[in-house]
């Protein structure tokens, strides 16, 4: 305890530099080099004023050319680009959710996919008015999965999961006409609206951006989260470790990367198989270590305690250790650079999804029906590759931190039950957290999410903002690459309580939690929505009244914009550290940072300066407290 | 008003009051006027612990108030609230200290006010063993006196130490409820500021047992939160001042349970595990224990009165007495005997002779009780270990007083307890239940025979008990550090004193006086993973000071590396550490080339120029302090006492009472080691000297051996 120390950004950078030396030795490319080649970036693109939706252009807006060939102004172009960005993100998340629902549809008692959390399945079935009595759990699973898959193309009505939102929120959505319909429909509508010769009115484009985002958050993403829990178990607090030091030089190292846990779950299972371990030993290794990158890592960390090798901008570092036998990827956020990079080492770059096919990779087509064999073949491939390792190139830094992860909404409520007093309190609610907030012991909460982005020193904003928040008694819930940044720094070690203000520190001690709670992968931001909904119901306050805000300081993907839209549309002010390509339109800026407040009681704030960003969040939280008189 | 605002307002109010009180005192007496709390080596303990600065006069107190002001920051963060709570407590300590000016005695019965260091040291062992599972602070008046008294009683029956502040004291008096330190219900005072006297206990516990350095406020708060199982029950109405005091309590980790809403808003005032609103007074007990995670060990004993450690110190006066058994006048004894399992019918309680209801009120009788036990792992060596616990077991019975041991026991049973239906067989029930419960690992079967027949008692005392005692004594005298193969570690105190380790040998019992080598052995057998572990003694480093490689290894391991090496027989070279709950402390007196010993009960001055409390504050907390050593009373007569420095011949001074207690055995040892007769006559006491010069003259006159021994330093 006494020797607890955060890993600094500088230490992580030194490690990266050391690894890049190896890269230079073998002639490897790196994102750092590519960023240089791509700088400066296209100004028109950055401002969002470049339109290449039809072939009359491309058009770009300047003071001298204020309209495109069709006559669309900067506001329309920025708005269309923003909506298309959202649609891309929503499609990615939601398709991930669909895959999971599809996997559930194929679950069988004999595996490889089973129902691990039947309780949750039954709960969802009841929510959706599906008869559960006397039904075989697998029959029920298939029925529920069928309905879930139907949510993507339902002919009428809105997303089933929106019934989980507080009534006031649903009222706002109804009034603003942004209640999400079928997921596929919202994406199609977005594409249609932005087609040449359709909507150029910013307000309408933002409304559809919100509705598309909501179909992700309260639709596709929530499907991904909930049915992953049904299949693989609802996460509970579990100990793990984070940063490159989790890789073990003597072992066969398999790194899983991407977002969909279906494959990685099975890889973890086979890597644990005594037969496979014996095989690895026969090949000269001491054992098998599976570690993860990005959200696949988050998924298996919070369910199995599988260590986290790193987040988004560390994906190349994993290969640069020279000790990675295989990097196995599913979908999203995979650098095509991994192909050529893996060729500089012995590493096998294994792609598995038809959604994500890349040159210079071994493609093992993954299918729910043959998943077991696929996973086994991949583990074996990695073991067979161990002997090809070049020991001269191996460098695994010993840097790693302990982390307690796995705080699903259910786990948070259970943790809160632990601090109730059975003589006066009810259990199974978020009320203890509300008491901490209303009494002022905790000032509020920030949901920290999102990626890394080379525009910002990797992890710098995540970690520094978190440090600032916890020192001010603001609890952090984190997901995605933000969560991994926290874990790598040590902020998910329970000992990090000593970096908190007295209030949050006391809460960490009494509840036995770290000050930054790992809520999962990026689809699991849906867990944060559910938490906000519960807090609202348990307190009788509207979500927008809660001293809670969202923050994506280093975001980069289209998914992040979709997320931002559903978080704001749910009533939570959202703070960004990177501009979402809208600075070219003052109307769009005004709408997103202020105008939308009239519809959903929340808006965006974009601020690139670290201190200001932190101060603004604290200010907003204190404003909300003052408004409540707490 | 938010909860934070209430705390800030209360803190401001108390600060204003304190500032005025100090200014008035200075105006009346001048800034140089001395101020102090009695019987403590820690100045104003709370202020000293938080800041590391001692306050000796009014001027210093005024300066200290300036320091307190710096704690009173007003950001909207819990740290500011905690610090304002602490500041409120420190102000209360100043106000209370002013009451003691000029040696005044501001508190009269039933109130205690400030509690002496010795009281805290005494509480150490029962707190560690869980005999006192918690400390309740009850503040204000309950809705009705009956509800208040019922609450006090409920804690008392669980062995919890109860302290009272304000209206609850009057409520206890109103209903004639007995209070006092001996029944573990301590009224502190009627002003809210008197609550500081229990805070002061918790804080001194950290300094005494926890080796928390004065000025280490963070370490202090961590210690009290993790190790002092206290909680507060504050009755409505709560004013700002009480809420500010409550913030101080919560800062130290003590939850506050109240039947009032601290603020208007229904949710606003509550904080999980810290500030809990319980409107039903009858549930205060359960709510509080759960909030502080206090588990009560329950032994179900089939007797008609309460059974709790709180009654251990209860005194029964002649007038309240129904009947008495007195081993000093008639034949009495208590005995444990190991039998074959076939000879015992479990839970059989036999009374042989007339029962208590046939005795006249106030009469004196014989009694003898034999607890017969059987078990596969039972050893005869454990008999005396069990037997020594009888004193504490029987004393826990409400309205029963037990003193002495073996065949020198005395038992009184009160009229109330008799009227409640208590009879001779219930003595058997208590002994049966406790022996079976606490020694379950070695006792499979147990039966008890209670003799009240006078002739039978005489016969059994002489033919059964005394021969057993003689045989045991023989074994004990033949048992030396050299005659055994192993010693035992004891870390029972580590809950309180995290880096202290006792090494218990046949000739050096634990410094608390409560753990002999046999006790440690039994504890180890009963719980092999427990606080007493076997230490081998094969690799001797230095025979003279009693240093062993194996012992050092064990000490390093059990102190988590805090201690490197210890000697068993020296107080100068690598002396053994103390936890803080030692019975006696000895320290070097340079002028006479010897050591003075003071026991915890002795409140006066020693020739070293320090009282027991001050001497005791030099060591403890698991830290080695050459020249000072805490130890048990029985160790004084040991041949291993300071063996490295020449043994008991170094003892030049002891309080008279202690000297009398150890005289017989000490004289024997001195005779055996040096051929000196009546050695204790050569040792000074408070009637001879309280300063080194007078003591030296006395020692020279007596020809004390220490004067001609090698210089100690």
Image (cartoon, coloured by chain):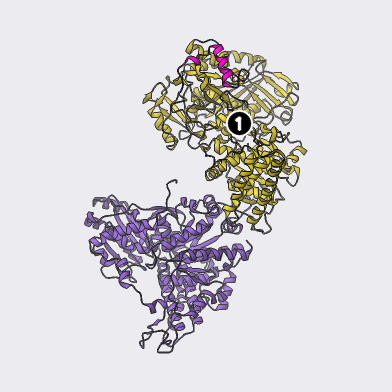
Based on the displayed image, in which of its 4 quarters is residue A296 positioned? bottom left
Secondary structure under tag 1 reads helix
Magenta residues (range): B684-711
Per the rendering, the colour in which chain B appears is: yellow
Q: Residue at x 43, y 38 (%)?
A: B560
User: Which residue in the protein does label 1 denote?
Assistant: B118
Residue placed most toward the observer, A365 or B15: B15
Q: Name chain A's colour.
A: purple
Q: Residue at x 56, y 14 (%)?
A: B682
Residue A114 against residue A565 in the figure, above or below: above
- A411 is higher (above) or lower (below) than B195: below
User: Is residue A609 located in the magenta-colored stretch of the structure?
Assistant: no
In the image, residue B352 lies at what x, y percent? 65, 20
Whether residue B257 is visible: yes
**Residue situated in front as seen by the camera: B69 or A500:** B69
Q: Quarter-wise, where is residue A85 in the image?
A: bottom left
Quick one: which residue is furthest to the bottom in this view? A70
Where residue B437 sits: x, y (%)? 56, 33
In percent of width and height, residue B185 lies at 68, 36
Residue A608 at x, y percent in the picture: 45, 68
């Amino acid at each position: 305890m006494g020797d607890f120390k955060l890993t600094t950004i500088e230490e992580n950078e030194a490690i990266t530099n050391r690894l890049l030396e190896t890269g230079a030795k073998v002639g490897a490319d790196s994102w750092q080099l590519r960023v240089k080649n791509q700088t400066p970036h296209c100004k028109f693109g950055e401002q969002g004023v470049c339109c290449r939706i039809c072939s009359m252009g491309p058009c770009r807006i300047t003071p001298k050319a204020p309209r495109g060939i069709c006559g669309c102004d900067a506001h329309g172009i920025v708005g269309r680009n923003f909506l298309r960005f959202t649609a891309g993100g929503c499609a990615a998340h939601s398709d991930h959710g669909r895959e999971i629902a599809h996997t559930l549809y194929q679950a069988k008692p004999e595996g490889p996919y089973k129902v691990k959390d039947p309780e949750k399945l039954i709960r969802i079935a009841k929510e959706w008015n599906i008869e559960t009595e006397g039904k075989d759990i697998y029959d029920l699973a298939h029925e529920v999965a069928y309905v879930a898959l139907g949510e993507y193309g339902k002919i009428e009505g809105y997303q089933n999961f929106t019934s989980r939102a507080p009534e006031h929120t649903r009222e706002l959505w109804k009034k603003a006409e942004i209640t999400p319909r079928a997921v596929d429909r919202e994406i199609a509508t977005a594409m249609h609206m932005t087609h040449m010769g359709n909507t150029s009115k910013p307000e309408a484009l933002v409304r559809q951006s919100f509705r598309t985002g909501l179909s992700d958050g309260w639709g596709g993403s929530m499907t991904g989260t909930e049915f992953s829990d049904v299949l693989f178990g609802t996460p509970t607090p579990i100990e793990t470790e984070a940063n490159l030091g989790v890789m073990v030089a003597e072992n066969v190292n398999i790194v899983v990367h991407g977002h969909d846990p279906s494959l990685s779950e099975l890889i973890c299972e086979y890597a644990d198989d005594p037969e496979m371990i014996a095989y690895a030993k026969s090949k000269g290794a001491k054992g098998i270590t599976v570690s993860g990158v990005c959200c696949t890592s988050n998924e298996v960390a919070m369910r199995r305690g599988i260590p986290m090798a790193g987040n988004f901008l560390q994906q190349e570092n994993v290969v640069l250790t020279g000790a990675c036998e295989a990097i196995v990827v599913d979908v999203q956020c995979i650098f095509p650079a991994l192909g050529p990079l893996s060729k500089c080492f012995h590493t096998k770059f294994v792609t598995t999804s038809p959604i994500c096919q890349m040159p210079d990779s071994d493609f093992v087509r993954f299918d729910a029906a043959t998943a077991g064999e696929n996973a086994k073949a991949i583990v074996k491939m990695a073991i067979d590759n161990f002997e090809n390792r070049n020991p001269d190139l191996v460098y695994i830094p010993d840097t790693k931190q302990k982390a307690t992860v796995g705080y699903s909404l259910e786990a948070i409520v259970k943790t809160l039950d632990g601090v109730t007093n059975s003589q006066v309190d009810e259990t199974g609610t978020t009320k203890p957290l509300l008491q901490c907030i209303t009494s002022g012991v905790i000032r509020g909460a920030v949901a920290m999410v999102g990626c890394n982005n080379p525009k910002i020193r990797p992890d710098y904003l995540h970690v520094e903002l978190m440090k600032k928040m916890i020192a001010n008694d603001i609890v952090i819930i984190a997901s995605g690459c933000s969560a991994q940044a926290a874990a790598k720094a040590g902020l998910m070690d329970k000992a990090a309580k000593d970096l908190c203000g007295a209030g949050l520190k006391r809460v960490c001690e009494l509840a036995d939690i770290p000050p930054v709670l790992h809520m999962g992968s990026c689809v699991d931001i849906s867990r944060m929505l559910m938490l906000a909904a519960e807090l609202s119901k348990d307190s009788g306050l509207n979500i927008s009244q809660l001293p809670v805000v969202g923050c994506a300081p280093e975001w980069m993907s289209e998914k992040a914009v979709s997320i931002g839209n559903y978080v704001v549309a749910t009533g939570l002010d959202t703070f960004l550290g990177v501009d979402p390509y809208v600075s070219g339109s003052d109307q769009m800026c005004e709408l997103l940072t202020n105008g939308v407040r009239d519809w959903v009681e929340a808006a965006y704030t974009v601020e690139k300066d670290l201190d200001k960003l932190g101060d603004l969040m604290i200010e907003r939280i204190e404003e909300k407290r003052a408004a409540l008189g707490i | 008003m938010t909860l934070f605002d209430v705390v800030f307002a209360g803190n401001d109010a108390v600060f204003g009051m304190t500032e005025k009180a100090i200014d008035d005192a200075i105006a009346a007496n001048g800034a140089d006027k001395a101020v102090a709390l009695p019987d403590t080596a820690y100045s104003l303990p709370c202020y000293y612990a938080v800041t590391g600065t001692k306050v000796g006069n009014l001027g210093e107190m005024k300066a200290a108030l300036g320091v307190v002001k710096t704690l009173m920051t007003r950001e909207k963060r819990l740290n500011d609230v905690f610090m304002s709570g602490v500041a409120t407590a420190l102000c209360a300590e100043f106000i209370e200290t002013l009451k003691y000016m000029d040696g005044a005695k501001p508190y009269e019965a039933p109130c205690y006010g400030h509690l002496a260091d010795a009281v805290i040291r005494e509480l150490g062992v029962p707190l560690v063993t869980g005999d006192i599972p918690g400390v309740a602070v009850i503040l204000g008046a309950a809705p009705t006196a009956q509800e208040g008294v019922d609450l006090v009683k409920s804690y008392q029956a669980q062995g919890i130490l109860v302290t009272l502040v304000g209206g609850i004291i009057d409520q206890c008096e109103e209903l004639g409820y007995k209070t006092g330190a001996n029944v573990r219900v301590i009224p502190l005072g009627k002003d809210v500021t008197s609550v500081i006297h229990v805070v002061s206990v918790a804080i001194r516990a950290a300094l005494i047992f926890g080796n928390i350095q004065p000025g280490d406020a963070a370490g202090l708060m961590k210690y009290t939160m993790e190790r002092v199982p206290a909680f507060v029950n504050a009755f409505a109405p709560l004013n700002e001042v009480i809420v500010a005091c409550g913030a101080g309590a919560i800062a130290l980790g003590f939850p506050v349970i109240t039947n009032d809403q601290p603020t208007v808003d229904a949710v606003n005032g509550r904080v999980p595990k810290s500030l809990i609103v319980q409107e039903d007074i009858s549930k205060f007990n359960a709510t509080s224990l759960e909030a502080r995670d206090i588990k009560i060990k329950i032994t179900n004993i089939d007797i008609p009165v309460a059974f709790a450690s709180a009654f251990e110190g209860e005194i029964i006066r002649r007038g309240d007495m129904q009947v008495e058994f007195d081993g000093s006048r008639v034949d009495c004894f208590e005995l444990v005997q190991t039998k074959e399992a076939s000879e015992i019918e479990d839970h059989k309680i036999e009374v042989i002779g007339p029962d208590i209801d046939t005795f006249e009120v106030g009469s004196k009788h014989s009694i003898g009780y034999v607890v017969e036990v059987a078990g596969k792992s039972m050893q005869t060596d454990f008999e005396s270990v069990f037997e020594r616990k009888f004193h504490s077991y029987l004393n826990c019975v409400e309205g029963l007083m037990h003193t002495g041991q073996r065949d020198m026991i005395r038992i009184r049973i009160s009229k109330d307890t008799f009227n409640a239906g208590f009879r001779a067989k219930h003595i058997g029930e208590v002994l049966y239940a406790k022996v079976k419960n606490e020694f379950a690992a070695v006792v499979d079967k147990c039966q008890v025979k209670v003799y009240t027949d006078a002739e039978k008692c005489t016969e059994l005392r002489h033919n059964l008990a005394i021969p057993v005692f003689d045989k045991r004594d023989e074994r004990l005298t033949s048992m030396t550090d050299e005659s055994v193969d192993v010693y035992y570690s004891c870390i029972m105190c580590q809950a309180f004193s995290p880096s202290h380790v006792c090494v218990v040998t046949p000739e050096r019992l634990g410094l608390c006086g409560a753990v002999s080598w046999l006790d440690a052995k039994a504890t180890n057998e009963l719980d092999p993973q427990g606080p007493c572990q076997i230490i081998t003694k094969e690799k001797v480093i230095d025979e003279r000071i009693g240093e062993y490689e194996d012992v050092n290894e064990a000490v390093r391991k059990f102190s988590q590396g805090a201690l490197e090496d210890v000697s068993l027989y020296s107080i100068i070279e690598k002396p053994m550490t103390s936890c803080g709950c030692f019975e006696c402390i000895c320290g070097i007196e340079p002028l006479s080339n010897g050591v003075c010993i003071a026991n915890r009960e002795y409140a006066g001055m020693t020739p070293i120029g320090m009282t027991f409390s001050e001497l005791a504050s030099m060591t403890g907390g698991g830290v080695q302090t050459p020249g000072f050593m805490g130890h048990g009373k029985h160790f004084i007569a040991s041949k291993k006492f300071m063996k490295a420095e020449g043994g008991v011949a170094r003892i030049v001074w002891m309080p008279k009472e202690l000297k009398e207690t150890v005289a017989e055995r000490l004289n024997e040892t001195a005779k055996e080691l040096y051929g000196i007769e009546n050695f204790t006559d050569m040792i000074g006491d408070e009637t001879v000297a309280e300063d080194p010069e007078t003591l030296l003259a006395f020692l020279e006159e007596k020809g004390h051996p220490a004067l001609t021994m090698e210089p100690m330093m």
